Amino acid sequence: MMGRALLYLVSIAFAARVTAAGLPDFTDIVESSAPAVVKILVEYESENLRSQEQMEELPEYLRRFFDFRGGPPVPRDRAGMGSGFIISEDGYVVTNNHVVENARQILVRLPDRQEYDATLVGTDPRSDLAVLKIQAQDLPALPLADDEQVKVGQWVLAIGSPFSLDFSVTAGIVSAVGRSLPTETGDNYVPFIQTDVAINPGNSGGPLFNLEGEVIGVNSQIFTRSGGSIGLSFAIPASVVRNVVTQIQETGVVERGWLGVSIQDVDRNLADSFGLDRPRGALIAQVGGDSPAERAGLLSGDVIIQFDDEDIETSADLPHVVGLIAPGTRCEAVVIREGSEIAVEVEVGGLGANQVARVGRGVVSDGSSTVLGMRIAPADPKALSELGLAGGVQVVGIESQSPAAEAGVREGDILTRLGSRPIGRMRDVEDVQNELIPGTSLPARLIRAGSPLFIGIRVPTADD
């Protein structure tokens, strides 16, 4: 019995040694890479200073009124900070745009306490990246990795200055790749790397390393309810960083590839109605007038499943791929159109850093009868004109427990297409009704609150 217990303890001790030996040792990475990680100290123009400038523009009698009330508050500069890293021996530094946005003065501090005034070379708000330049030579620099090799579950390391605790090191694993986090303006050009590395305010702009000491991303955002890390942090992948930095260094501005389409995901009903083997691809809900997509012959209702040899699994994948393609490049788009796979050659357009991606409303459509549980009537011509529609019919009621109700059609939607047929007026709907095949699904294109979307509606069988 004693021998068995001793054998058990020995086996536990051996397992612990093996587990410990399997964990990575980050000391070499920190020693070799930390000298190139910097702290960014920023002074922002205070809003009170702008208020004082506005006061000076007021008529004298109004200024006297404010003087009597005590005048505007004394202006004070606001201070901020973040992290960054050196990418070249001659002093180019990468950080986040939100760290240096609206800065009056930027100071870069190295781990050896040397400080340099920095010049802002250029920014890209869409990717939240900025490039700085300091006047120094023979600086330590960090290489950017090939982020296509980043795998979920691999170890990663971050260095930065959270809460002003200079050059802190944290580690974790990659939780997901290609994560979409659309901005407030709807931009979705960054396929973020999600990690559980402890990232906090002040880490912004700092590097995310792989075990080879290469930078695979720039720490940019966290999800938090407390203001601190809860294990959900997001980094801009190195491929995006490389593209943005190169453009800023060469031209001072960033231009992205652009198609000019509104897209949406494909659910199970839509996949069935478009003849897909499974939900995948980016469904074109609308094609902008005089856009690269329109010139290439892409159509509303096409499902893009591949672009420039890259598989498109979800709608979020398409802007990630197109955004990195240089404007003017000719690429092949593989689409599903009316159940058949076809290839379309597209010349990618360009979208400048300050341009807003909008798709003009140029749709062909027309508009009481009932089809698939939708009670429809001719649409108001004035409403169609305001939406930029040539026609369409309006959904004025939904029958409960009908195919349309189950699919999510709403009263007030404007129907512009059903199946493969454009709907421009009531007669078009009657024509479609005669072609419905029980047990199949067909896509309905709707305009809801001014935006286009597709919904898959299942045609009921006699047993339903």
Image (cartoon, rainbow, N blue to C red):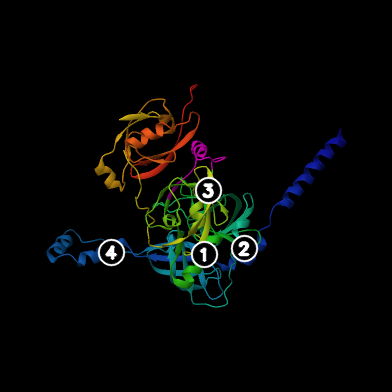
Q: Residues within 10 Å of mark 3 (few under 14, many from 20)?
A: some
Furthest residue to the left? Answer: 61
- Identify the element where label 3 is drawn: loop
Looking at this view, is 393 or 254 the one in front?
393
State the separation of the CA atoms marked 1 and 3. 25 Å
Please report the bounds of the magenta region as a residue range. Answer: 262-279
The amino acid type of the residue labelled 3 equals Leu
For marks 3 and 2 on the same chain, the one whose residue lies earlier in the sequence:
2
Looking at this view, is 61 or 176 the one in front?
176
- Identify the element where label 2 is drawn: loop
Mark 4, mark 1: which one is toward the viewer?
Answer: 1
Q: Mark 4 = which residue?
A: 50
Q: Residue at x 48, y 74 (%)?
A: 134
For marks 1 and 3 on the same chain, the one whose residue lies earlier in the sequence:
3
- Asked if residue 83 can be seen in this view, the reply is yes
For marks 4 and 3 on the same chain, the one whose residue lies earlier in the sequence:
4
Instruction: Estimate the x, y position of residue 47 in percent, counting from the top left.
Output: 30, 61
For marks 1 and 2 on the same chain, the one whose residue lies earlier in the sequence:
2
Q: Mark 3 = which residue?
A: 232
State the separation of the CA atoms marked 2 and 4. 42 Å
The amino acid type of the residue labelled 1 equals Asn
The amino acid type of the residue labelled 4 equals Arg
Q: Mark 1 = which residue?
A: 243
Which quarter shows the N terminus? top right
Q: Residue at x 17, y 58 (%)?
A: 69
- Asked if residue 206 can be seen in this view, the reply is no
Disc number for residue 214? 2
For marks 2 and 4 on the same chain, the one whose residue lies earlier in the sequence:
4
Can you tell which quarter of the image residue 444 is in?
A: top left
Looking at this view, is 170 or 370 the one in front?
370
